[in-house]
Amino acid sequence: MGKHLSTLLFLVTLLIACMAGAAEVEPPAPTQESQSGQEPLSPLSVLSITPVEGEPGSTVIISGTGFTENTAVFLATQELSATIIGDRQLSFEIPDSPAGLYALFLKRDDGTVSRSFSFTLLPKKPIAIDLSPDTIYSCTSGRDREVVVSGHNFREGSQILFNGAGIRGRFLSSESISFIVPQVAGGLHQVQVRNPDGSSSGVLGLMIDAKPEISSVTSGEEYVNYYNLNIDGRNFQQGSTLVVMEERSLELVAPQLAVDVKRLQSGGGAIGVERDRVVYINCNRFIYQRYPYSSVPKNFKVQVLNPDGSESAVVSVSAP
């Protein structure tokens, strides 16, 4: 009996020891998710890039998943700051870098990197804003035909496109370039700037005023049987016609006036009339060699007609 009691006490002691050992075992450590109280981050991925090409200064929007406030955009090795738009979108501004094809990818602050995508950085297009002056006269020459184009993004070696044809420009700065207007017909002409990379600006309009204009008529040298009338103005041409309109009285029942018209072509005599002629000096002056039949001043009118059909205003003159 004593032997059985000893065995029973041993078993009880052993059981108590085992239960005490089990109580001392530490529970498993909590997972990272339970420690932070936050859900694990989604994989960093890019679903779309809009647009997939652009000029410096343009905005690009990237849609995807796994974005955080510290997600950066990389264009090749250049890190760009990004703006989080929402859980699934961020945007960035294209930097002022050379044109070309770049690898674009995202990098999160925990070191996660997205897959890379190809992004085309386009050259900056020239922007033409203004012409100074925007109107020139046909008969000007040299530096008087110089026009300055104002705008942005001009480069050394930029060309002027005049009605689509390239002519040399004089680079002044990234915001201005000048050129000499070629000798062309009057009217509205198109001006653009083309950079060396082939990009072109929008079109500006340049007006070339070819309409003749008489500013003054004055007496000049006098000779035995004729004298000179100096007709000054602008946009006169070799081959222009001077129209002379003289009034004369008709002896009828009631007094009436008739108008005699002479047409004198510069470089020749009067059409159908002898002696009177017009000498072309330059685009600003004609000399009208007038053969009067009387030294008494009389009133008449003159007008200049150019070969293209444009005509000046009619000017009144009082001379013999």
Image (cartoon, grey):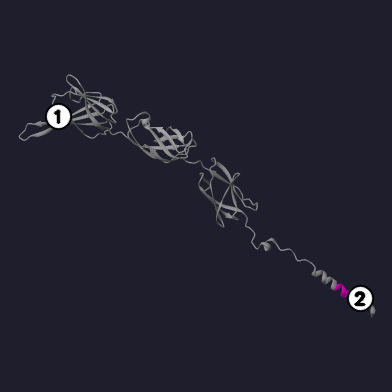
Element assignment for label 2: helix
Main SS, magenta region, reads helix
Element assignment for label 1: strand
Q: Outermost residue toward the right? A: 2
Counting other residues with Cα less than 10 Å from the Cα at mark 1, is it few (<14), some (14-19), or many (20 or more)? some
Where does residue 257 sit, x and y in percent of width and height?
11, 33
Residue designated by label 1? 298
Where does residue 215 sit, x and y in percent of width and height?
25, 32
* Residues tagged 2 and 1 counted as in contact (Cβ below 8 A): no
Q: Is residue 13 magenta?
A: yes
Residue designated by label 2? 7
Residue 304's place in the image compared with 202, above or below, is above
Instruction: Give amino acid for label 1.
Output: Lys
**192 horizontally vs 120: left or right:** left
Residue 12's place in the image compared with 134, above or below, is below
Where does residue 46 sit, x and y in percent of width and height?
58, 52
Residue 267's place in the image compared with 49, above or below, is above
Instruction: Give amino acid for label 2.
Output: Thr
**Quadrant of res 138:** top left
